[in-house]
Amino acid sequence: MLYIVATPIGNIKDITLRALEVLKEVDLILCEDTRETGKLLNYYKIKKPLLSYYKEIEKKRVGKVIELLKEGKKIALVCDRGTPGISDPAYILLNEAYKNNIKVIPIPGPSALTAAMSISGFPLKKVYFLGFLPKKENQKRKVFSEFKEKNETFIFFESVHRIEKTINLLNEIMPENEVCICRELTKLFEEIIRGKVKEVFEIFKKEKKKGEFVIIIKGEKNGY
């Protein structure tokens, strides 16, 4: 069996009882960073073998993992934070598992995406999730220009290294749109910034913001 296990996005107590039970019973845990997952397991006094499984080595490692599953091993896949498969490694392994008739079991729980959506206050009947945007400014500009013409809410992740340039670009392209920026969700310095893009732009001009960000932008003509 292959378990897809959601783990905390920040607050270490945000984990389900079922997730803890699964992590205790599996034979092996696949994780992006063994150090990060090790902290979680140590906190809950769980001792299990860990195997690195991140984007750069996913293709190399998937064969070995499938062989272990075919031998009858129970394996859990986790990412550093949140739910695997949402902008984190899982796609290749899942497809190979299905091809080999291996049972896949989701263990739902924390996700920065759904946490941010739940407190945005924006219409969510139809949304576009873009994951992490392209790093190059011209490509990012193209994405924003395209979505400026849409009415639906759109959501993406952004890193601390690119947040300022992203806010500047948003202010240039869609200053009147409403935006909800969620920073460091569930962590000690959690912050929710909400308003028009041009208002949020002024906040970021005055103060440098650090951490991980989820950005939700309401379509210009999206009513409630």
Image (cartoon, grey):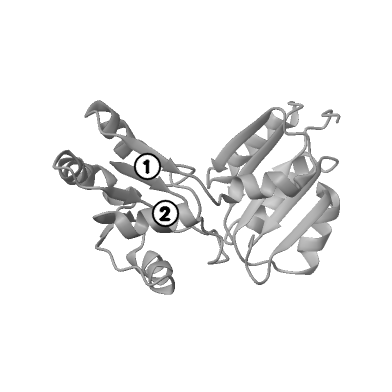
Which residue is drawn at the image coordinates 24% and 28% (left, top)?
Answer: 101
Q: Are marks 1 and 2 in contact (CB under 8 Å)?
A: yes
Residue 3 falls in image quadrant: top left
Residue 90 placement: quadrant: top left
Label 2 neighbourhood size at 10 Å, few (<14), some (14-19), many (20+)?
many
- Residue 89 visible (yes or no): no
Quadrant of residue 51 within the rendered picture: bottom left
Identified by mark 1, the residue type is Ala
11 sits to left or right of 43: right
Relative to 87, 168 lies left or right: right
Q: Earlier in the sequence, mark 1 or mark 2?
A: 2
Give x and y (percent) for residue 180: 76, 49
| Figure disc tally | 2
Q: How many neighbours does mark 1 have within 10 angstroms: few (below 14), some (14-19), or many (20 or more)?
A: many
CA–CA distance between discs 1 and 2? 9 Å
**SS state under label 1:** loop
Mark 2, residue position: 79
Q: Quadrant of the C terminus?
A: top right
Q: Residue at left 28%, top 49%?
A: 75
Q: Which residue is denoted by mark 1 in the rendering?
A: 90
Q: Residue at x 78, y 57 (%)?
A: 193
Name the foreground residue: 108 vs 127: 108
Q: Looking at the picture, tell me which residue is in the foreground, 206 or 157.
A: 157
Amino acid type, callout 2: Cys
